[in-house]
Image (spheres, grey):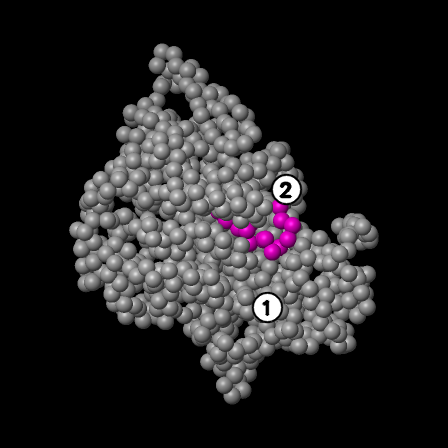
Amino acid sequence: MVNLRNSIAVLAFLFVSCSGVRYVSEPVLEVGVSKNLAVYRKSVLSNINYKLELDIPRNRDEIISAVEEVTFQLSANKYPLQMDFRENAKKIKVLQVNGVNVGVNHKDEHLIVESKYLKQGVNVISLSFEAGEAALNRNNDYLYSLFVPDRARTVFPCFDQPDLKATYSLTLKVPNDWKAMANGTLKDSVITGDRKTYNFNKSDTLSTYLFAFAVGKFTLAEGKVGNMVTDFLYRETDTLTIKNSVDEVFNIHTKSLKYLEDWTGIPYPFQKFGFVAIPDFQFGGMEHVGAIQYKSSALFLDEGATKDQLNARNNLIAHETAHMWFGDLVTMNWFTDVWMKEVFANFMADKSTEEITGKEVFDLKFLTDHFPAAYSIDRTKGSNPIRQDLDNLKDAGTLYGNIIYHKAPIVMRQLERLMGKEKFQMGVREYLKEFTNKNASWPDLIRILDKYTEADLQKWNKVWVNEVGRPVIDYTIEKANNKIKKFVITQKSEYGADRIWPQLMEVTLYYPNRSEELTVNLNSKSVELKAAEGMELPSYVLFNSSGQGYGLWPLDKSIYSEIFLIGKAVNRSSAYISLYENMLNGRYIKPLELLNLFVKGLDQEKEELNLKLITNYISNIYWEFISEHERASMFASLENALWNSMQKQSLPNNKKVLFKTYQDVYQSAEAGKRLNAIWETQKVPAGIKLTEDDYTSLAFSLVLRDGDSSILDKQLKRITNVDRRKRFEFIMPAVSSSMKKRDDFFKSLELKYNRDKESNVGAALYYLHHPLRQRSSFRYLEKSLDMLSEIQKTGDIFFPQNWLQATFGYYQSKEALKIIEDFLEKNPQYNPKLKAKILQCSDNLFRAQKLLSE
């Protein structure tokens, strides 16, 4: 037996493949899936098939019995083979290798198969075991798997790395009144007594994180996506919402599919298309081939849906559909490049909406969707580059966040603009064809794109993809005879060493009766805008007017009085974002001044997305960046401004945006009585439609202010959908006026079982740590940080970020800041990626202290 734990990789063997010669070291045994292990297994394994049978009882407390047969080609058997299984070894009942019963050797989350049982050529490993449940999301009457990024190994033994693609032959035994969906098409189903067996055909070739199934009490809707008959499973019960949503969901998928087929030049590449709507799903969606999973509330919208909600649904569906090509057909080699699949999914989703909506609407939506979210991380000292190093897949979840979902699409759009749309498309098409059903890396794509442009993509890639941060832009204008003699634009780094962010952006010069937009190639530390020389001095200048440039842009203070009169919505939006970002940096404008400026625009701004943007900024500034004394002196006037502006707005969605902001910031007894009457009678102001979820959040807001917990009991009785009732019941104690109930609730989160519904936990923590409750919730902060490592280990990919954001997102006190500083000081060797998450989510707290002290 080889001692893998203590071996040092001093020997290497030569492995010859179609890509050339590689030296692959002996795999060291360690917790997780290390890069070393992954490289070794990729060099010796191929043609993998998992034949898996799961027997799922109706009672969620009973074990899930499993039988598995793994077939694979092995090119060399010098070393023992490690299969990943992050579970108790006692769960494995039988283990056979090539027909021989062998003892279970399980160490550091790996099932170790000695080389003497293996052979070059085809091997078969057979197992009988109890399935792990960490990634099975088991509920009373439904279950769904979610294996991204490396959690398939928590359920069944496998080779859990993205570049070991395999096929899956799945059988599910479930209660006879349950429905099932998986990656492969349904072969047959057989009912025996009170049990039903679903046998699925062999799936397409997939990475382990894309293998998926869902079973339970679902309603089945059949429709068509393109030319394919498609199944849609859901648990929504409201008939009007179902009527408004189901056909539209099929329709949006069809449009997205057609756009992607046309743009890529590759017909839909898999055997089936299907999707399932899951209550309280951890993410917006997950791109499992043939069995896409969505958060139910993101798909099912009623007549009161805002433009923001409708846009979000369109984008979500387009995003997951784009993944069929970007991520599923061509998959990253290693999670270092997880951002590639996400950036293309977001970028292609955006492009497909541009085709439908037109350029002006697209530009505004792209700006409001991506830039505030990207800046929220990139402005912090915990920011990360788009492409991050990763030594072990156990940390892969920490790579996810706003940088890969929001900064990356901005950067990709700049790349497309740099190359030209046609050349960019040609390069991406070549990339997809070359790596169909294979794995690829970012350097693979850059190598191909390099053929289609004269630009230095390596230099461009270094600053935009491999480094963090954003540029800070300034300018000077030399004048002569009321004309521009010289217009100089400079850039420097917000943090660290100065460098250059090459990009194209626009500057617009505004005059009393006209405007002139000029394009700038910002490709050095200092650029002279020659096109502006000789032009008349403008009334004011707006940087990044098109909303395509990335950075902290300078402001012309003359814009303050004119901002709501700017004609183009995207220009106004860019100005709003620049104002807010500069306020956070202590430049040009103070928080209270900006809050009052935005309040002036509440009845002047008619574009819904812009109104949503500035009302979000109003809420943020109100709760985070002005003092409690300032809030006390202005809450009445702010409430009146919001209510009066709501009356003046003509569009229903604009009215609803303002109503929701009023609900968020109100503090007066008068406003409380008004909102309580609306909640009690369900009679809303003219032009506004509120959903059941809207009344639920209103009930929570009322209890936070007046402490009448009986409101929660009354609201619970109004909710008929079983899944929404459970969500409400979970959140209730976090909102309760009883401190003991809140204490008990927080204590309960120490148990993994009580954190399973992660979206519910995040919502509950928001209320637990609401600014109006922080005097009592402050004592939860230290323990929340102590729990973070466990949260990362046991939770899904977004949970650490959501946990921190919901906990620290609205604190502004010195005491809260000290808890973070003390924690970081006491833990100098803390996981650097989790430390970065702490710095990201507490950045507003750091800034609040600085701004409040000025």
Please give the residue where the numbered disc 2 appears in the rendered image.
446
Q: Could you tell whether 388 is left or right of 619 in the image?
A: right
Closer to us: 459 or 424: 459
Q: Position of residue 200 (x, y in %)?
A: 59, 74
Q: CA distance from mark 1 to mark 2?
A: 36 Å
Sooner in the amino-acid sequence: mark 1 or mark 2: 1
Please give the residue where the numbered disc 1 appears in the rendered image.
155
Label 1 residue SS: loop
Residue 509 covered by magenta stretch = no
Q: Position of residue 109 (x, y in %)?
A: 65, 63
Closer to us: 785 or 77: 785
Q: What amino acid does circle 2 point to? A: Ile
Label 2 residue SS: helix
Q: Position of residue 294 (x, y in %)?
A: 46, 62
Identify the residue at horizontal 27%, vertical 67% (top origin).
713
Residue 396 covered by magenta stretch = yes
- Magenta part, dominant SS: helix
Closer to us: 621 or 203: 621
Q: Quadrant of residue 730?
A: bottom left
